[in-house]
Amino acid sequence: MLTLAAFLALAFQPGASPDPVEELPTGPPPSIQIVRLDERGNLVTQVTVPVTVTVEKAVTRIVDGRQVVEKVAVTETRYRAQEVTRSGRGLIVTDLAGKKFDPKEAARLLAKPTLVAVTSDGKPLPSGYQRLFVKGTLVLTLPGVSEVPPIAPPAPPLPPPIPAPRRG
């Protein structure tokens, strides 16, 4: 996961044409991730995870007509970076045009944390999505990996409201 600013910096090219999209994207959209390859060839991805913490906050209340400052425990969600490592076996690294990099070149390009597009269905990046990225963006394809979230079934309809009893 990325911050919105990082996504916008990578995804939208300055001076991009506002013309209608010539080819609509097909398939699932790629995810934008910060990745690197470690010395063993494993793919290390930086992810942002939510963490629930309890913090103490000072709250001013009025008690018996006086302002009193009380300390109250409040639950908050904070976010922290975490690295997730998975096997780099079968990893395919390409440029936007689909030119594959050999494993040594891919290791050199991904030696330090790099912002990349990752296909979520194990297939090359569809051309309809390619126009969203700047030239030089690396595309990672992990065969057999699907990161497409399952679609939740729609919620059942709410029952009609029950009218209040009439007084009379």
Image (tube, helix red, strand yellow):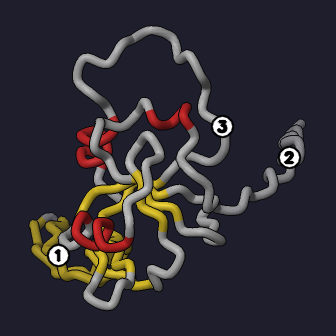
The answer to whether the residue labelled 2 contacts the one labelled 3, judged by CB atoms less than 8 Å apart, is no
Q: Residues within 10 Å of mark 1 (few under 14, many from 20)?
A: few
Q: Answer above or below: position of 58 versus 152.
A: below
Q: Residues within 10 Å of mark 3 (few under 14, many from 20)?
A: few
Three-letter residue code for mark 1: Lys
Three-letter residue code for mark 2: Pro
| Image location (x, y in percent) of residue 69 | 10, 74
| Image location (x, y in percent) of residue 45 | 35, 74
- Toward the viewer: 10 or 141? 141
Q: Residue at x 28, y 57 (%)?
A: 115
Distance Cα–Cα, label 3 vs label 1: 49 Å
Q: Quadrant of the C terminus?
A: top right
Numbered disc 2: secondary structure: loop
Distance Cα–Cα, label 2 vs label 1: 40 Å
Numbered disc 3: secondary structure: loop
Q: Residue at x 74, y 58 (%)?
A: 152
Question: Is residue 123 shown left or right of residue 75?
Answer: right
Q: Tell me, for residue 57, which label it has, or none.
A: 1
Mark 2 or 1, closer to the camera: 2
Three-letter residue code for mark 3: Thr
Mark 3 or 1, closer to the camera: 3
- Toward the viewer: 151 or 32? 32
- Please name the residue that numbered disc 3 is placed on: 26
| Image location (x, y in percent) of residue 131 | 43, 30
Q: Disc 3 or 1, which lies upstream in sequence?
A: 3
Q: Answer above or below: position of 24 versus 57.
A: above
Q: Tell me, for residue 157, which label it has, or none.
A: 2
Numbered disc 1: secondary structure: strand
